Amino acid sequence: MENITLTPIGLIHTPFATTGDAPRGPSSADGARGRIVVDEKYAAGLRDLEGFSHVIVVFYFDRSTTAPLLVTPPNSPVERGVFATHSPNRPNHLGLSVVRLEKIEGNVVQVRDVDMLDGTPLLDLKPYSAPGNVGEGIRQGWIDEVGGKVTG
């Protein structure tokens, strides 16, 4: 396989300096506010995004240093495959969160329910639209077994 090179398109600013400070997923972020500062050369790409209530944020876990294939999530007593979790410690250190969009001013996107660390590199933004993107018959595997809440 060929290597892929990604270039950040901006930075995410949040109140969380360390992994111990950060919520375990957007569902535990409890309204935490953040700013996504998109590089000026990509600012035109924000046009029409403000009409959406939520955005999908694709980011790089730049402070992750390990990539175990088996992890024990905080809400599970059982070790799980990393691809069945939201662990930041994964082979490519890619993160994805759905956050509430509050407003856009120029190249700054104000959001809520952030779970990223301050200074996290932004790779992409996408509008969130549901349920059409997913369809019917959604299953959550082991997450349903532990009460349906996704953390870590």
Image: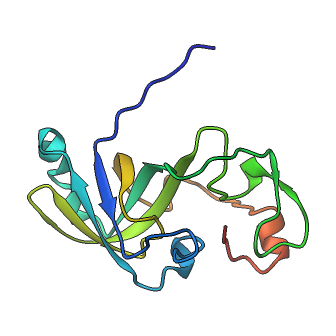
> Is residue 128 visible in the rendered structure shown here?
no
Residue that appears at 63% across and 14% down: 1
Q: Quadrant of the C terminus?
A: bottom right
Which residue ends up furthest to the top in the rendered image?
2
| Residue at (89, 73) in percent of width and height | 77
Residue at position x 44%, y 65% in the image: 117
Q: Is residue 6 left or right of residue 101?
A: right
Q: Position of residue 8 (x, y in %)?
A: 34, 40
Compared with residue 23, is residue 98 higher up or lower down, i.e. above or below?
A: above
64 lies left or right of 10: right
Q: How many marks?
A: 0
- As drawn, the residue found furthest toward the bottom would be 30
Q: Residue at x 42, y 76 (%)?
A: 113
Q: Is residue 92 left or right of residue 9?
A: right
Residue 24: x percent and y percent?
A: 60, 73
Tell me the colour scheme of the image.
rainbow
Residue 4: tell me if it is visible. Answer: yes
**Residue 54 occupies which quadrant of the picture?**
bottom left
The image quarter containing residue 151 is: bottom right
Query: 40 left or right of 38?
Result: left
Of 95 and 137, nearer the camera is 95
State whether residue 17 is above or below residue 132: below
